[in-house]
């Protein structure tokens, strides 16, 4: 029997279930959310102000609803979507609370209604925020300059690959240095973006201490080495204490060293990329710095570099003169620049939210957050080690895991037939979010990679672990219960059989109507699930 002891009763949860159509199927002609006053007699009718060529020939196909009906509809949809409002120990990239005040600030007209093509004299406040946050990022990393154009972590890695090409070309070594070295547990975007930029990729395997050996690095280095691209700590929470020697060896071979700081949370304010010798690094503002990830939407992979690489950075860069005026150094002012990797200056609202996060915490708060993150992670590890069938990766590494720890549920699958996806589906029946598994390829079988960070309380961490332990015990006692989960949600398991058949789904209302007409159907395309046009025929939960 397991030595594991739960801390409290499990949450009693059941998701809301509404037979909710898509909004385009609701309403009746003539209903309105707002009644606009009649145009005064001495004002020209609106249609006279719009050129004839721009006027609609018929009214737009919009649902006609009262304000209350619209509000109720979207409330129902939100109730049926657990989202990330449960306990979410999302690992391999830190997820944090996104302060509501930041959403209000970035929606203010002073930011939301400005345009980057305005005269620079009218953008002084926005440019100051970008400039000041760049100074914060430089202080945390030791880098000389930062650019916020990249749209995420992978974009920042690709930016470095492009900067590396420009740097090599300037030295006359682009044809010679064709290889980028990374490691098997570094985020796969580093290998992928290096390959996309035309480099050959060498991937180092893990050694006995949970990270590649110095010997394997030496064997990979040569006159063909262009760069090293690694994360530290890695996605298993293990910090490579030899990283400074790694960077020195890469420099001796003539290459650059890039620090993927996606797992910065556990070392922020304690480890600076420049002090380890790195030439460049990146931070994910939409994770580590408290801005929303947005489900693949608004993001910033902040890319910083040493003074030597500044000439190759994307432009524009924000400048500040001796009188305190802010300006923009454009591409035409930097002949060695790689140009733009995204329009204008990047996603400025995300930069402003990250600025607010840094200012709110201050230097001490950032250090406290890192300490809490490490403490919570190791507390979580201690309890998870007591859960039946859960095995820690690299069990021989007895040092503290700094950021997260990858665990394997392979033993549970072998003994019960229940895999990690089944367990994830069942966990959401208790009001917690499904655990993050791991990036592909899986070097750990049946992985989960939880990360508590500094956000979650001890009670939240305990509840998440208790739910995982309970579901694993269910897998041993009643495997079918877990395999058929979730049971307490608006939608249970979705039949994926039609996912590759475009006749079975539609992403817009116009496409839906077109496909329905082509099929000669009266009803919606495919089977409508709660919340709209779905894929296949999902069955509702109990």
Image (spheres, helix red, strand yellow):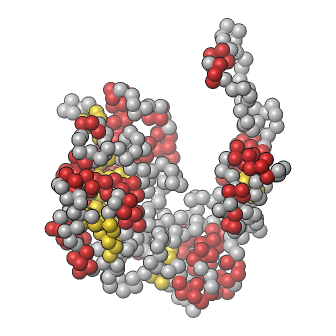
Q: Quadrant of the N terminus?
A: bottom right
Residue 405 seen: yes
Instruction: Work out whether 192 lies above or below 468.
Output: above
Q: Residue furthest front?
A: 175
Task: Residue 29: give x, y in percent of width and height.
Answer: 81, 34
In the depicted view, which residue is nearer to us: 63 or 174? Answer: 174
Q: Residue at x 82, y 51 (%)?
A: 521
Q: Residue at x 79, y 52 (%)?
A: 519
Q: Quadrant of the C terminus?
A: bottom right
Q: Which quarter of the picture shows residue 180?
A: bottom left
Instruction: Work out whether 252 lies above or below 511.
Output: below
Task: Residue 247: give x, y in percent of width and height.
Answer: 21, 67
Residue 370 seen: no
Q: Which quarter of the picture shows residue 179?
A: bottom left
Task: Residue 472: give x, y in percent of width and height.
Answer: 60, 81
Q: Residue at x 31, y 57 (%)?
A: 161
Left or right, 406 with respect to 470, comes to left
Q: Residue furthest top?
A: 42
Q: Residue furthest right?
A: 522
Left or right, 98 with respect to 530, comes to left
Task: Residue 475: give x, y in percent of width and height.
Answer: 64, 83
Q: Which quarter of the picture shows residue 396?
A: bottom left
Q: Residue at x 66, y 14 (%)?
A: 48
Instruction: Work out whether 412 lies above or below 221.
Output: below
């Amino acid at each position: 029997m397991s030595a594991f002891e739960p801390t409290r009763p499990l949450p009693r949860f059941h998701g809301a279930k509404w037979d909710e159509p898509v909004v385009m199927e609701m309403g009746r002609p003539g209903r309105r959310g707002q009644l606009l006053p009649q145009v005064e007699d001495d004002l020209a009718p609106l249609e006279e102000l719009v050129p004839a060529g721009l006027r609609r020939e018929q009214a737009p196909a919009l649902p006609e609803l009262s304000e209350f009906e619209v509000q109720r509809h979207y409330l129902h949809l939100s109730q049926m979507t657990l989202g990330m409002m449960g306990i979410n120990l999302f690992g391999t990239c830190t997820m944090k609370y996104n302060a509501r005040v930041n959403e209000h600030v970035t929606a203010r007209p002073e930011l939301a209604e400005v345009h980057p093509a305005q005269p620079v004299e009218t953008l002084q406040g926005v440019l100051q925020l970008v400039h000041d946050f760049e100074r914060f990022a430089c202080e945390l990393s030791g880098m000389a300059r930062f650019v916020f154009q990249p749209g995420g972590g992978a974009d920042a890695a690709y930016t470095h690959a492009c900067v590396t090409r420009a740097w090599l070309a300037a030295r006359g070594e682009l044809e010679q240095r064709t290889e980028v070295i990374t490691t098997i547990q570094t985020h796969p975007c580093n290998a992928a973006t290096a390959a996309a930029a035309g480099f050959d990729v060498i991937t180092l395997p893990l050694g006995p201490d949970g990270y590649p050996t110095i010997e394997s690095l030496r064997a990979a280095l040569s006159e063909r080495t262009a760069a090293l691209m690694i994360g530290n700590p890695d996605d298993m929470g293990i910090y490579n204490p030899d990283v400074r020697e790694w960077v020195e060896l890469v420099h001796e071979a003539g290459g650059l060293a890039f620090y993927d700081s996606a797992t910065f949370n556990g070392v922020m304010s304690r480890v600076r990329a420049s002090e380890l010798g790195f030439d460049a690094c990146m931070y994910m503002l939409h994770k580590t710095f408290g801005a929303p990830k947005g489900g693949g939407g608004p993001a910033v992979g902040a890319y910083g570099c040493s003074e030597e690489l500044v000439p190759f950075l994307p432009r524009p860069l924000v400048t500040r003169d001796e009188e305190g005026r802010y300006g923009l150094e454009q591409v035409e002012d930097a002949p060695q620049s790689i140009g733009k990797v995204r329009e204008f200056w990047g996603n400025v609202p995300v930069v402003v939210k990250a600025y607010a996060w840094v200012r709110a915490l201050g230097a001490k708060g950032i250090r406290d957050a890192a300490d809490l993150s490490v403490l919570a992670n190791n507390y979580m590890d201690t309890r998870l080690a007591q859960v039946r069938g859960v095995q820690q990766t690299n069990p021989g590494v007895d040092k503290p895991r700094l950021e997260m720890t990858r665990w394997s549920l392979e033993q549970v699958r072998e003994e019960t037939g229940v895999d990690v996806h089944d367990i994830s589906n069942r966990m959401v029946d208790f009001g917690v979010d499904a655990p993050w598994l791991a990036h592909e390829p899986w070097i750990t079988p049946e992985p989960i990679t939880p990360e508590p960070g500094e956000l979650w309380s001890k009670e939240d961490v305990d509840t998440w672990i208790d739910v995982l332990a309970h579901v694993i015990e269910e897998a041993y006692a009643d495997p079918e219960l877990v395999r058929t989960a979730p049971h307490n949600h608006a939608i249970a398991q979705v039949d994926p059989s039609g996912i590759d058949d475009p006749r079975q789904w539609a992403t817009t209302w116009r496409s839906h109507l077109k496909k329905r007409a082509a099929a000669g159907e009266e009803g919606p395309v495919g089977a409508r699930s709660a919340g709209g046009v779905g894929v296949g025929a999902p069955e509702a939960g109990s």
